[in-house]
Image (cartoon, helix red, strand yellow):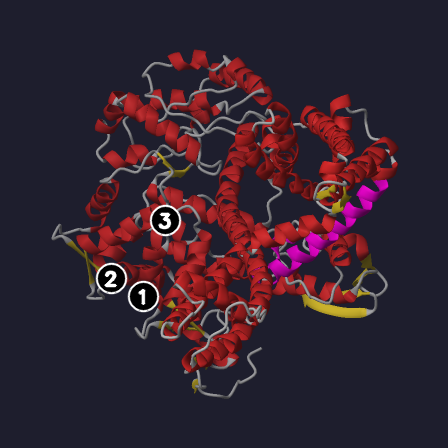
Amino acid sequence: ILGCDNTLLTTQIIEDELEMTMVCHRPEGLEQLEAQTNFTKRELQVLYRGFKNECPSGVVNEDTFKQIYAQFFPHGDASTYAHYLFNAFDTTQTGSVKFEDFVTALSILLRGTVHEKLRWTFNLYDINKDGYINKEEMMDIVKAIYDMMGKYTYPVLKEDTPRQHVDVFFQKMDKNKDGIVTLDEFLESCQEDDNIMRSLQLFQNVM
Amino acid sequence: MAAGVAAWLPFARAAAIGWMPVANCPMPLAPADKNKRQDELIVLNVSGRRFQTWRTTLERYPDTLLGSTEKEFFFNEDTKEYFFDRDPEVFRCVLNFYRTGKLHYPRYECISAYDDELAFYGILPEIIGDCCYEEYKDRKRENAERLMDDNDSENNQESMPSLSFRQTMWRAFENPHTSTLALVFYYVTGFFIAVSVITNVVETVPCGTVPGSKELPCGERYSVAFFCLDTACVMIFTVEYLLRLFAAPSRYRFIRSVMSIIDVVAIMPYYIGLVMTNNEDVSGAFVTLRVFRVFRIFKFSRHSQGLRILGYTLKSCASELGFLLFSLTMAIIIFATVMFYAEKGSSASKFTSIPASFWYTIVTMTTLGYGDMVPKTIAGKIFGSICSLSGVLVIALPVPVIVSNFSRIYHQNQRADKRRAQKKARLARIRVAKTGSSNAYLHSKRNGLLNEALELTGTPEEEHMGKTTSLIESQHHHLLHCLEKTTNHEFIDEQMFEQNCMESSMQNYPSTRSPSLSSHAGLTTTCCSRRSKKTTHLPNSNLPATRLRSMQELSTIHIQGSEQPSLTTSRSSLNLKADDGLRPNCKTSQITTAIISIPTPPALTPEGESRPPPASPGPNTNIPSIASNVVKVSAL
């Protein structure tokens, strides 16, 4: 499957008369990926097969990403949250997620240490990547999560439910009550909360 | 959920870690992957041709033969492969369906063979991809028509179930081959139509002279004979019309139909003639009326299939004919005007006016050339020749265009209608798949709750009742459950949502506010609206024995009828909670969904309605009223 072990990252651009460009990306070799991530070769193979099936060109762009993610949440609208997820996956901010980025993020989420997981989550919440989470960013994230629920929920979703949720979050996380949550505050608060610690271990055996 | 996307489920679940810090409730346990084995290649031997694929590829569709344990019946122990004694060509398509998620229909394949194979492998043909769906449907329809024809010809030899006299008569009229009487009737009427038409024609032939007067047409010479013939024909036609009117299933529709109008018009002149006296003033009009007798010839169209088809063709290509007429009219007007002004100068010209020139133009353009009107001037002759040359083109050209237009438009219409019908079907399929996916989750939730209810009451043998979902499905549902926990809201279906809206608009929730006040965070109360899974300790342990017993009683009733006995648990726990003060961690909770009308996977199960919870355990008494099969569950 990963036939080109020795090739570097190649990006070929093929043009024809219709001016269609097809970007074809081949990932790094299997050994390198195995060294960089916490997955075994077999797991990487399974992951790549699924990845390549949906994205034969080797990269995921945001639309495909949103489409794939939306399939898991048929009730509501998953596109906003998928957008934030995509930005979290796309560490180099190129607009497309390659297999290496994908696998690196998965490795952190599934096999990383608690610290790494929390750091990744902080990065997800920090929409503008400035190192701090403020209330607006949190509102956006929480609103996006609630959007995934859709319209038909019990109890009925009220307008200020997300706001209340964010307030609770900030009360818990913002230690010095300055309106923003820094990485250290976040790490500290999460490590104090049993629920969060437990739920972080939930997907240990996903692969 | 599409097949290929199932491979991305690990990613979606990993991404759920992003919700964890936001959630305030503990998450449900993940479903364990009991048969954790490495993905292996399996060999499928189909009539000697070996196909190999991953086991997980086949397991994407667990409700087909290859995806379920049904294929174990075909496992060959000696060669360690699965052997199917079926067509390898079609199997190629079937296997590609598992690989790509799209089922294709190859054009060279026979439709019934393909259908048989799909039925064998447990695949519904409705999921054929859009690229091949039209072709498949076309072939299927042709096949169905062929089968229907076969059936009809079989049925015709059987005797029909007894119809009423009226229905038999109608059938006899419409289809003369059904009985000999109908056939006799058919021929008799046909004969009389011919007789009537021939008499009308012969009536006008001059037949010898009576000495002393001018030549008479036969009609006036043998007027009595002709009158008798006419009367006989009209009587037959009248009787036939009345019989048809009696037998028609829908008299109003029959009267409005073309054939009956022709019938009426054919016999009317006779009756009008009977009524009217031999008055000189009206006899002129009467004579004109006789013209309508010629319409009797149209009655032949009942006897001739070809005439009917011709009529239908003309009707359906009316717009093309109209265009032909219009272009001809344009040409006629142009040339008539030109000829008129060209011939204006010449003396004794026949072209007295433009309308008079119309006749010349028509005769010339259709290359008839009677010669009664002839141009005399040179300009007239020139334009006349141009007229006749263009006439050939103008007449000859639209005809094949009309024919091909007709054929093209007809097929186009068919295809457009087909596409429109398929588009609706396609959107419906997408919608069904989507609601199916969301409904599957709601179903499994109810099944899961029922399982836990049964576990609580200590009937472990029923435990695995609902656990027929595949691993991927259970993982997907777990993911959705985590989302519910994160947001502290539940997924419900549309009807329940509407009911809740109505209820909430009718009643306020004054009592819900009181518990919320007692907690320091308003959200934790709604947080505790979730029933915790069995891993977190339930308040059962705090309950006195009496409660458990009452729970048992209720549970026995509930198994027959409806809902979880943990209602009482929750209500009592509500009371306990109110005493203890609410804690941020929701270790105790109460059920919000409840009702299952049948213990087996329910077809339609209304979810619990909400009601403001009374503080006292009064509602407990309502629970035994299961006769209604719907129990209201309260929620904080």
Badges 2 and 3: C-beta atoms under 8 Å apart?
Answer: no
Q: Is residue B142 magenta?
A: yes
2 vs 3, front mark: 3
Nearer to us: label 3 or label 1: 3
Magenta-colored span: B125-154
Query: x, y (%) of residue B414?
Result: 58, 56
B129 shown above or below B343: above
Tags 3 and 1 both on a single chain? yes
Q: CA distance from mark 2 to mark 1?
A: 8 Å
Q: Quadrant of residue B396?
A: bottom right
Residue A148 image label:
3
Image quarter of the C terminus of chain B: top left
- Check the residue under mark 3 and report the chain it is in: A
Q: Amino acid at mark 2?
A: Ile
Q: Residues within 10 Å of mark 3 (few under 14, many from 20)?
A: many
Earlier residue among tags 2 and 3: 2
Separation of residues labelled 2 and 3 (CA atoms): 18 Å
Q: Could you tell me if residue A34 is visible in this image?
A: yes
Classified by dominant secondary structure, the portion drawn in magenta counts as helix
| Residue type beneath disc 1 | Asn
- Residue picked out by circle 2: A127
**Residue bearing the label numbered 1:** A87
B500 and B140: which is toward the camera: B140
| Percent coordinates x, y for residue B425 in the rendering | 54, 49
- Is B257 located above or below residue B82 in the figure? above
Amino acid type, label 3: Met
Residue in view at x 48 percent, y 88 percent = A7
* In front of the other: B33 or B225: B225
For marks 2 and 1 on the same chain, the one whose residue lies earlier in the sequence:
1
Disc 2 and disc 1 in contact, CB within 8 angstroms: yes
